[in-house]
Image: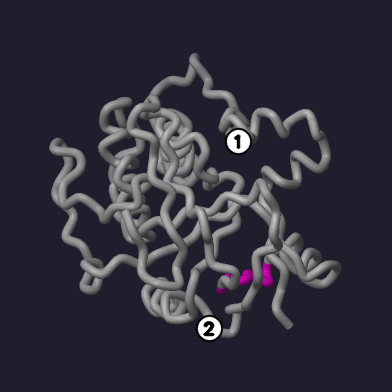
Amino acid sequence: MSLAPGTGHMTQPDESAPLSRHAMLLSTPPEVYFVIVNGAWPSTRIALASSGRFVSAAFEAMRDDPSKTAAYDTGDLDYRPYIENSDWIGRWSAPGRTVGLRYRLDHDAEIVRREHYPLSPSRLSAIFAFGDEGSCERAEAELNWNPQDRRKFRLIPDSRNRVVRLNMHTYTAARNLYLTELDFSPSEREQLWLPYWGGKGPPPRPIQRLPECTPPTGWSTPLWEYLIDGELELVR
């Protein structure tokens, strides 16, 4: 698999290795990224004011506790902050559905990543960025983000950096299905999330029992986002 010039080279998985060890890691990731910085979050303001850097959760965890490094190297760090309740009643109230939507969404994505792409950065750890300003501008237009929040960063070199390039539209398409359904079987979770972690576009109807989602205009062109385990430094 190849990428456009200037966007890095994809590491090819070893076909003799178990599927669960494959990763869509970029062997030569971009050096410069564009990030939408939400200044309303206190942690964001503090990080930029104090150091001008963003650090992924995995890198922070390894700095706080070096014993976690081995689990990071093998793809065995557990990023899920909560344990599922086996005694849960299995039904949602309207407010409960709203509260549970975002976590269920990324929890299910994380379950599939752990199983099939354990070396890829987790959405529960990574810094989210765009590899070029044009992609960032597209995201701003599609998601109504403020262009004034756009900042330019560089990736600080580190032998443990991990970067993947994924289609943001695939994540958004899955999220739209969670607006109508929160509970998916293990096989349905894979149908939803394997295309995302594999760097592919959204399937037209990943879950047959649910209505087909008509993709918005422009989704035929991938919107590439980068998930980064590492440290970004603001370019001033």
Residue 79 bears which disc, if any? 1
| Camera-nearest residue between 27 and 223 | 27
Instruction: Give the numbered dot on residue 147.
Output: 2
Q: Give residue 101's position: percent from left, percent from top.
A: 44, 44
Nearest the viewer among 137 and 19 is 19
Res 25 visible: yes
| Residue 189 position by quadrant | top left
> Range of the magenta residues?
34-40
The residue drawn where x is 66% and y is 46% is 160
Residue pictured at 64% horizontal, 35% vertical: 72
Residue 27, position as x, y percentages in the image: 51, 53
Residue 94 vertical placement versus 223 (above, below): above
Position of 230 relative to 117 (above/below): below
Residue at screen point 45% across, 68% down: 7
Quarter of the image where the C terminus is located: bottom right
Q: Helix, strand or loop at disc 2?
A: helix
**Would residue 36 be visible to someone looking at this image?**
no
